[in-house]
Amino acid sequence: MTDFPRGSAVQPKVPATVLVVDDSATKRYLLVSWLTRAGFTVIEAETGGEALTKLLEVDADLVVLDVKLPDMSGFEVCERIKTDQRYGVLPVIHVSAHAVDVNDRTQGLNRGADAYLVEPIEPDELIATAQAVLRYYRARRRAELLAERMVRLAETTLAINSAPTLPALLAAAAEGAFHIFGGPVVVVAENSEGESLAAVGRPATVRPWSVPEDGVAAGSLVRTDEPAGWDVAEWPPGDTVAVAVARLRADRPPVYVAAPGSSQNPGFPVLRQLSQAVAAAVEAQRSFDEEHRIAVTLQRSLLQSELPRVPGVELAVRYEPAGAQTEVGGDFYELTVLGGELLVAIGDVAGHSLHAATVMAEVRHAVRAYAVEGHPPGAVLELVNRFMRTVLPHDSATLCLLTLDPVTGRIRMASAGHLPPLMHVDGETSFVSLRGALLGIAAPRRAELELTLPPGGTLVLYTDGLIERRDADIDVGLTALAATASEVEQDLDAFCSRLVNRLAGTGQQADDIAVVALRRSA
């Protein structure tokens, strides 16, 4: 070995820690001096056992390892470093003044060494070899990290696109980003009502928080901010915040994804792609929410807005649109006083679309028109059926129609394929059995039934969204309804709410729900 020539070694671009392992104090001194002058942080070990112990205690980037050691060979030490996961992916350079022939160099390289230098070693050669090995390993680590992050990005993209609501979408993005970058991430977006929400942490919490308006144009960019401007999260001390901003349209608010600056790959490829994926998902969710709000507004505008006041009879209704689609549906109800009697109708037009809502409105108006002419329920159904077959030949609907005399409790009822009404009297529940073909088809005259609702008795009419489930028989839903309605609250509105919440309150309901409840005063 020769002395270190001043200024001849190239300084490493990134600081690195090197473990020098040699039992010769003189050789170790020279190696340490050369590496230290080149800008490396150097730690020392005299034996293979000491080296393996220190590698578990110190975060080293490179090992310069003598082949001849007093306790074990350098080949064995290298092999253990390369095969034991506790040491991670660590490059090793062998140096030797004795094992210098081809067989020795071949054995060292075959057992895991990344380079093999034989003495006499020039300082420039050692430094250049160390830098070359570190460049390769750092590039490999960057590529492996990027590949791992891209896999997690794909998983996160799937999670955010599967989220049913905007808060759930933002939470999925924040939690997925935490797994990608290994630290706190903030995801910010506005909902369809203009409220800015931020998701932070793991598990993510979502709360109102806004980014100051900065005039971001359509497109995407990544910038570096100070942590003080993002105090919604706790950032690593002394770190900056990398903020990816994505804006799909100039008339839409941007989406922000902020992560620790030190966690980023060069060029921010994963952070940028994540922000774009979140922006696309947020735009889709925002459009869905807007369409659903418009659909529900339209649906409610077609329904009866005010219930009639009928002495001796309490009334309550409940309508819940389906949560799994944006289209308007065909569920409807009607409560009107005609000639001193209460007319009650509940029906369901097949389908979920604007057309179904239009048919629903026409059927509802036809029911009222024929009832105003004084026809009894059975005759009204026949007239409405004839109307549908003439004017709406490709549509069908179910309908239950009744009239109630508030004084006597006398009910005349007819059904066209609708679910049986439920009656609650003296703590007992029973279904009113009444059959009839649905509207829109040629069928025999639908039967009409007469019964009496006693004082204190309650009658419940409903559409299939309340009890039908894709994974269960309809009898299961009817049994659940009877059990749930075994008690009737003093407040009929509370009773209807409990029915809906208990029977359809779990998960996303697949169909609209309409419930009408009427009770004769005791």
Image (spheres, rainbow, N blue to C red):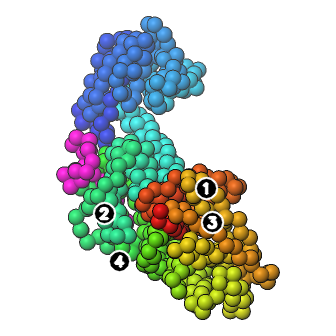
As helix, strand or loop, the secondary structure at mark 1 comes to strand
For the residue marked with disc 4, what is the amino acid? Answer: Asp
> For the point 59% across and 87% down, which residue is it?
371
Q: Say if the magenta span includes residue 230.
A: yes
In the image, residue 113 above or below residue 145: above
Q: Which residues are magenta?
A: 227-247
For the residue marked with disc 3, what is the amino acid? Answer: Pro
Distance between mark 4 and mark 2 Cα atoms: 15 Å
Distance between mark 4 and mark 1 Cα atoms: 56 Å
> For the point 51% across and 20% down, which residue is it?
80
As helix, strand or loop, the secondary structure at mark 2 comes to strand
Question: In the image, residue 466 lies at what x, y percent?
Answer: 58, 62
Question: In the image, residue 109 lies at what x, y percent?
Answer: 54, 26
Residue 260 seen from this side: yes
Marker disc for residue 421? 3
Place residue 433 in its image quadrant.
bottom right
As helix, strand or loop, the secondary structure at mark 3 comes to loop
Marker disc for residue 196? 2
Q: Residues within 10 Å of mark 1 (few under 14, many from 20)?
A: many
Marker disc for residue 251? 4
Marker disc for residue 486? none
Q: Are marks 1 and 3 in contact (CB under 8 Å)?
A: no
Residue that label 1 marks: 429
In the image, residue 453 above or below residue 112: below
Q: Mark 4 or mark 2: which comes first in sequence?
A: 2
